[in-house]
Image (tube, rainbow, N blue to C red):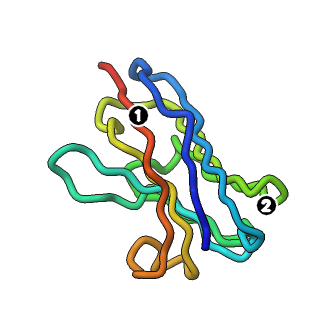
Amino acid sequence: QVQLVESGGGLVQAGGSLKLSCVASGRTFSTYVMGWFRQAPGKERERVAAISWSGGSISYADSVKGRFTISRGNAKNTVYLQMNSLKAEDTAVYYCAAGRTLPAIGRSTGDYWGQGTQVTVSS
């Protein structure tokens, strides 16, 4: 079992920055692939970024490349999402997820999810 708790969301002006954190419980955090997803009102959930257990493999959605950075600190059981140059279209609830493979994270029934944190970007 893995429990995930996100924090760091809030209201920011366009062009600003936010850093999201996701703290995981459980001693096997370092063996999981971690990912950030988001869902805006009326839209499907979108995968934003994912990082392998070692941090050696990272993927980003095209919409956030060059602006967002995912990282993890296995010693702290934490995964981060640094978001820069925020745009109004980044407004969404952001979710942290833990899974077993980078390609499939977020699509497996065995994945774990946090409760989400709201990010609102005003234009």
> Is 29 located above or below residue 92 in the figure?
below
Disc 2: which residue: 74
Residue 18, horizontal then vertical, whole percent: 54, 30
Q: Which mark is residue 119?
A: 1
Residue 121, image quadrant:
top left
**Label pair 1/2, CB-CB below 8 angstroms:** no
Residue at x-position 47% and y-position 81%: 110
Which quadrant of the rendered structure holds the N terminus? bottom right
How many numbered markers are drawn?
Answer: 2
Nearest the eye: 10 or 90: 10
Residue 65, horizontal then vertical, whole percent: 48, 50
Q: Circle 1: is it few (<14), some (14-19), or many (20+) Cα within 10 Å?
A: many
Label 1, secondary structure: give it. Answer: strand
Residue at x-position 44% and y-position 51%: 115
Label 2, secondary structure: give it. Answer: helix
Residue 95, horizontal then vertical, whole percent: 45, 52
The reply, left or right, for residue 76 in relation to residue 35 is right
Q: Which mark is residue 61?
A: none
Q: Circle 2: is it few (<14), some (14-19), or many (20+) Cα within 10 Å?
A: some
Circle nearer the N terminus (1, 2): 2
Residue at x-position 30% and y-position 58%: 45
> Is 10 located above or below residue 72 in the figure?
above
Q: Amino acid at mark 2?
A: Asn
Residue 53, horizontal then vertical, whole percent: 70, 72
Q: Amino acid at mark 1?
A: Val
The reply, left or right, for residue 16 in relation to residue 32 is left
> Real-space Cα distance between discs 1 and 2?
25 Å
